[in-house]
Image (cartoon, rainbow, N blue to C red):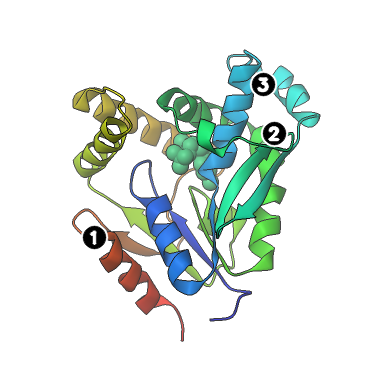
Amino acid sequence: MLKSETIAIDGPSASGKSSLAKAVAKELGWIHADTGSLYRAVAYLLEQARMENAGEDSICRYLKDRRIAYAVQDGSTRVLLEGEDVTDCLRGENTGRTASRISQIPCVRGYLLDIQRDLGQKGGVVMDGRDIGTVILPHATLKVFLYADPLVRAFRRHRELTLKGIHADLEEVRKDLEERDRLDRSRQLAPLVQAPDAVVLDNSHLSIEDSVQWILQKLPA
Ligand code: DC
């Protein structure tokens, strides 16, 4: 596989996109780019400034002078806010909810577009998100649309939170994912939707290793 090639993996929250994209990138010796972390970084930035509920215009004005960038470390992307690595501060449920909400704002999507495309253009990247196959990398070598049963996704997210020592109610987690899906699928701009030329992978009952092999077999020789 040439390094100028890319793989786009899109899918809903907790469908295992990032773990899978990371494992595929490792197998190929490519970079894994988690684009959700950029939206989370904007959410985090706004939360820190207590602006997460501000109007669209104020958010757009505020973002103009902020610097968000990707850095690559050990084959994965890290997110820098004003030069500071904030990747490990972005995984909270609240930040995820804010990210889903603010990702509907056109200037937020526009602001993050170039960062993602710049990295994609270098090639040798497995990028995961919601609009990678449709908007960010429309010419990706392979586009995968990930599906996982909603209850399986709720179990996965619940386990992830429990492992982090965060107490969560399974039914609450399920409802939260359902609401996030609704927002991500119904927004006007770059909604979560399968690209016409994407292949669907249902990983509800597959191990990461099996999913990686499935993807590698789909790559053009
Ligand atoms: O994948 P994640 O849960 O970290 O993403 C958080 C939110 O960011 C998600 O609910 C919607 C938004 N997002 C997006 O709109 N487009 C992407 N390519 C990635 C994430």
Q: Are marks 1 and 2 in contact (CB under 8 Å)?
A: no
Distance in Å between CA atoms under marks 1 and 2: 38 Å
Q: Amino acid at mark 2?
A: Cys
Q: Residue 20: give x, y in percent of width and height.
A: 38, 58
**153 above or below 168?**
below
User: Circle 2 sits in a helix, a strand or a loop, which is it?
Assistant: helix
Return the residue at label 1.
207
Residue 56 can be seen in this image: yes
Q: Circles 2 and 3: CB distance less than 8 Å?
A: yes
Looking at the image, is mark 1 or mark 2 earlier in the sequence? Answer: 2
Disc 3 element: helix
> Counting residues from the N terminus, which is met first, the one under dot 2 or under dot 3?
3
**Number of marks present in the image shown:** 3
Between the residue at mark 1 and the residue at mark 3, the CA separation in whole angstroms equals 41 Å
Depicted 212 relative to depicted 32: above or below: below
Which residue is the site of mark 3?
56
Q: Which residue is mark 2?
A: 107
